[in-house]
Every structure is written in structure tokens, then in C-alpha cells.
Amino acid sequence: MSLPEKQPYGRHIFRLVRASALVSAFLLAACETEPPVVRPQPRPLGRDLVMPPSLEKAEPSTSDDKNVVFQSFEAPTGELTLQRALAQALVGSPDLAAFSYDIRAAEARTMQAEFIPNPVLGVDAQDFGGSGTRRGFDGAQTTLSLNQLIELGSKREKRVRSARLDESLAAWDYEAKRLDTLLETTRAFIGLLAAQRKLELSEGILALDRQVHTTVDERVRAGRVSPLEERRAQVALANATVSVDRARREVTAARDRLAMQWGGKVASFDRAIGNLAEVSPPRPLTELLSLAAQNPDLARWATEVDSREAKVSVERSKDIPDPTLSAGVRRYGEDRSNAFIAGISIPIPVFGLNRGNVLDAQERLAKGRAEQRAAEARVTAAVRQGFEKLSSAFEEVNALNRDILPAATTAFEGAGEGYRRGKFALIDVLDSQRSLTEARGRLVDAMAEYQIARAEMERLTGQSMTSPHQPVQARTGEK
């Protein structure tokens, strides 16, 4: 009895692989039904920053050893403005750069979520290595099969939507960190301006004390006042010298703190330039509360709740069993014939579905909604407190400019003139000078507090607090 002619086994394998590829491509195309999640737009604050040429041309360089990306740019030199400092911090802040990697990681997770399950290639050999007619491989049955898991219940679409929402949350977190970077840089810049101004005041006081010491020395030599007054003048001059040295150290420390905002170890610029006296009345509280919706710490929670709802849908979709389709070719060793095989396998949820994970996702969703309400209350309270702080600083600046500083200046000038005419004692001059010094220092502190409070309000609202309806008041009241 002659064996039948050999069948083209390789052709069957080629057809099987081609059919599996076509089925996989069809499944992948059919699942592309979920629209992309819109990413949050950057808040208005800081969007109008003009990058200097040294920052616009800055390109990342990749380390060959650790695959870590660094940003190279030219450090600022000379005089530094707030706009340049903010732009420098946005480009060079190490903390902000770390958040950008979270966005890239979220994009990678979205890319992975879009893939359908890979087909499984199986090879099965039966009826070989036995006894009798089953000895060896002549009578063996060899099966080559491809198995494809079919995801039902829109699992892939829900998984992709959840990943895209997580990607949007990473963008929200980056935006919040961007505003934090702007705030911290502004704080450091205002601190440097205040330190520079206090150094100028200390140097002015030192110059005044030197003049007073010279005047007292002349009066002592002329026998018009007691030598005790000269010692008092020397003590005041020594204290002024110590104050100048301390103020210089504070300026150096403030410069370094500002440089740290863009990753600098030491400051390369000379000094900061700006006007602390630019103050204006704050916007109405109702307007600030409405603008607080721009706060990414609050706005992100809408996306957060959507993300947790998507995770609930993902877990619920797992309740639907996913069948596995299989198709293949079987080779019969006895007569060297070939045949196709096909099958389907379906998991039987006998020992429980996915109820525990569904409950976990639902509880996390409920927690997210509670946290959203807490965030709303927290931001509202912060806006109210910030408004009170801003208003208080504005009123204090006005009071110092309008009443306290002019009065202290007049008293000091009168005491100095009276001392030269012999009508007042040196102690009167020193007391009036101390009052003037304290008033000027309070003014610097109040202006710095106002500028920082305004920066904090800008962080809360996500936009500039400069009102087009309010005139800027730049008068300091100092001479």
C-alpha cells in the first residue's frame, strides 16, 4: 500500500501566520474608538516671558553613560531683572525638570496601554516515543497553532482612556510645579531687592553717623559739649559699621539663594534691579475667588475624578471573560497528511469575579471626590488669607509713605539742625535717627511683604495681579 502524496505543510503555515496578522491588525484598528484626552493649557502666569537668546538656543545634551538629560545655558551676568530670573528658572530648575520626566513616563504608559495582547505560537507533538507502531516519530501528530486573546467589554479602550487621563494629571502636576517655580523665584528675587535696599540704607546711616561724629568731634574740641557725647557718637558709628557688614553678607546670601532657583551653585550676576515701591490696590475678593478656578491645584481635580472613574470602568470591564481563539495546522505522521484545527477557550469565573478590585476603585473614586471638596475649601481659604495679607501690606506701605516716614524725616532733620545750633543734645539726634532708620526699614519690609503677597496671589489664581484699572503707586516717601 503506497503512501499518499506529501502535502505542502509549509504553505499551510504561511497561510496561518498571514491570517493571524490580518486578524490582529483588524482588532487593533477596530479598537481605535476612544478620543484623545485634552491636556491642560498652561496658566496665563508666565506665558508672556520672553526668553533671552542664551535660553532660546539652549539644547539638551544626553549623557552617554546614564542617559540623563541636562540643560545647558549661559548663566546671567551683570544686572538681573525679574523677567530674566523667571525665564532662567523655568529653563534651569532641577525640580521642574524632574516633573517633565513624569509626563514622558505617562506618555510611555499610554503607548503601552494601546497595544493589544500578542498572539501566542504553540507547537504540540503527540503519539511519539512509545511502543509498537508508536515507536519513534513516524506515527506522531504535530500541531502548530496560533492563539489570540480577544478583549471584550471595551477593555482596551477603557485602559487607554485611563492612561491618557493619568497623562493629563502628570501635565497638571507639571503646571503646578511651574507656578511654584515662578513663586519661589519671585520670593528669592524680592528678598534680594529688599536686602540690597537695606544695604543702601545701612550705608546711608553709616555716612550720617560719620557726619555726626565729625560734628561732635568739632564741638568737643571747641569745648562746647562733653567728651561723653563723642563716645556716644563713636558707639553709634561702630554699630552702623557692623550693620553694613551684616547687610552685605545678607545680600551675598540672597544672591546665592536666587541662583539656586535655576540650579546655580553661586551667583554670577552682579545685582538685581527692580522697584519694590510698585504697589497698587488689590483686586476685589469676589474677583480673586472667581479667578481661583485657574489654580492647577484645584483645576486638576476634575481630571483626577475622571481618571478614577475611568479606573472603575477598567476594573468593571474585567468581569467579562476574554475568550482565546486558536487556529493551526496538524501534521499526521502515519499517512503524512495535513489538516486545519480551530478552537476557542473561555475562562469560567467560578471562584469570583473582579469584585474586590472594583470596590477598591470605587472607594478611591469616593475619596477623590472628597479630596476635591477639600481642595476647593483649602484654595478658598488661601485666597481669603492672601487677600487680607495683600491688603494689610498695601495699607502699611501707604501709612508709612503718607504719615510715618515724612514725620520721622522731619524730626531727624530738625534734631540735626537744632544740635548744630546748640538747642538739642546728641541723644535727641540719635533717637530721631533711630526712629527714621526703623521707619525706612519697616517700609522696605512692608514693600517686600506686599510684593511677595502679590506673587502668592498670582500663584493661587494662575495669572498676574496687575490690574489694568488700578494706577501704580511708585512714591516711596523717602528723601
Image: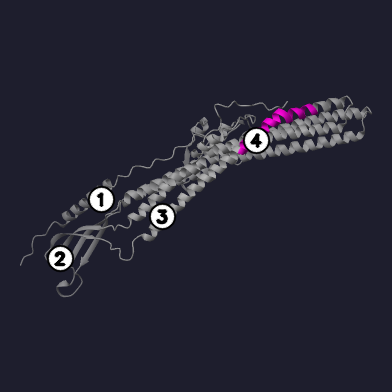
Q: Amino acid at mark 4?
A: Ala
Label of residue 362 in the image: 3
Which residue: 37% across, 60% down?
355
CA gap between label 2 and label 1 equals 31 Å
The answer to whether the residues at label 2 and label 1 have Cβ atoms under 8 Å apart is: no
Q: Residue at x 28, y 62 (%)?
A: 347
In contact (CB < 8 Å): disc 4 and disc 1: no
Instruction: Report the mark closest to the observer, 3 or 1.
Output: 3
Q: Position of residue 176 (x, y in %)?
A: 50, 42
- Mark 2 to mark 3: distance in Å? 56 Å
For the C terminus, which image quadrant? top right
Q: Earlier in the sequence, mark 4 or mark 2?
A: 2
Query: Which residue position is annotated with label 4?
Result: 393
Q: Looking at the image, tell me whether mark 2 or mark 1 is earlier in sequence order.
A: 1
Q: Which mark is residue 333?
A: 2
Kind of residue at disc 2: Gly
Q: Nearer the viewer, mark 4 or mark 2?
A: 4
Q: Nearer the viewer, residue 162 or 383?
A: 383
Read off the magenta span: 388-411
Sort mark 4 into few (<14), some (14-19) or many (20+) by Cα contacts within 10 Å.
many
**Residue 24: which numbered mark, if any?**
1
In this orientation, which residue lies closer to the viewer: 289 or 72? 289
Residue 350 colored magenta? Answer: no
* Residue 73 horizontal/vertical position (percent): 53, 36
Residue 275 falls in which quadrant of the image?
top right
Q: Residue at x 26, y 49 (%)?
A: 27
Label 4 to label 2: alpha-carbon separation: 94 Å
Q: Amino acid at mark 3?
A: Gln
Q: Secondary structure at mark 1?
A: helix
